[in-house]
Amino acid sequence: MKNTIWILFVAAGLSTAADIQGDWIAEVSAKGAEPQYARVKLHIEGTSITGTWNQLAVTGTASRDHLNLSLSNSGPNGPRNGTPAGTLVVTENSTGFSGEGRMSVGGRGAGGPENPVAIKLTRPAVHPPGGPRTLDYEPGVFYGYYSAANPPALRIFPGDTIRTRTFDASGRDNDRRAAGGNLETGPF
């Protein structure tokens, strides 16, 4: 009986570790700033984590449903190579991981003071089966600015084609008029 319980405990720990491995999208939010996004790739061996966070190196540990991550500059920037860029603690939730920590200048490894941040890690969208698609999109909402906070109008993948229309700078298209300005179609 003791052996069975021990095997179940080890298997439960390994299933969480297997779920950590692979690609993630990180959403980094700092007070008073637009969210920033990063591509994250994590590798796990035992409880040790290594990987990349855009151009940064990731090291850390996994413990049940918690990850402790350290970020450092790994680019070819001479004296900055290996410079600490942040520390994060995240907890598993229904969509991935979330938590908080401290990162320097948006986590780009540029040095300087570290700022408190909130973090969400989610898996990237998976390309639907069947290869590239052609999508017809009739715009209904327009933004006059770029922002990561604007929700996607469509999720697309390499090879997809979108057929849509746009407004010119005066707010005109083929058959209607909108408020002027540089109206953006999307984001996609």
Image (cartoon, grey):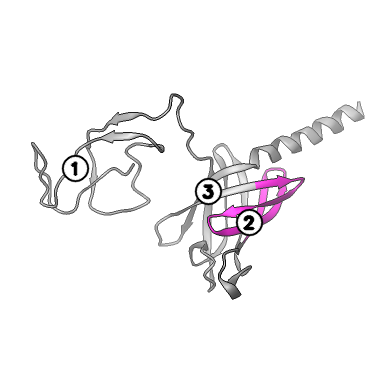
| Disc marking residue 58 | 2
Residue carrying label 3: 120
Q: Which one is in front, 177 or 44?
A: 44
Q: Earlier in the sequence, mark 3 or mark 2?
A: 2
Identity of the residue furthest to the right in this view: 2
How far apart are the two marked residues, 3 and 2, measured between alpha carbons? 16 Å
* 69 in relation to 112, above or below: above
Mark 3 secondary-structure assignment = strand
Mark toward the start of the polypeptide (1 vs 2): 2
Residue position for label 1: 166
167 in the magenta segment: no
Q: Residue at x 30, y 30 (%)?
A: 135
Q: Nearer the viewer, residue 53 or 153?
A: 53
Tell us which disc is closer to us: 3 or 1. Answer: 1
- Asked which secondary structure carries label 1, the reply is loop
Amino acid type at mark 1: Thr
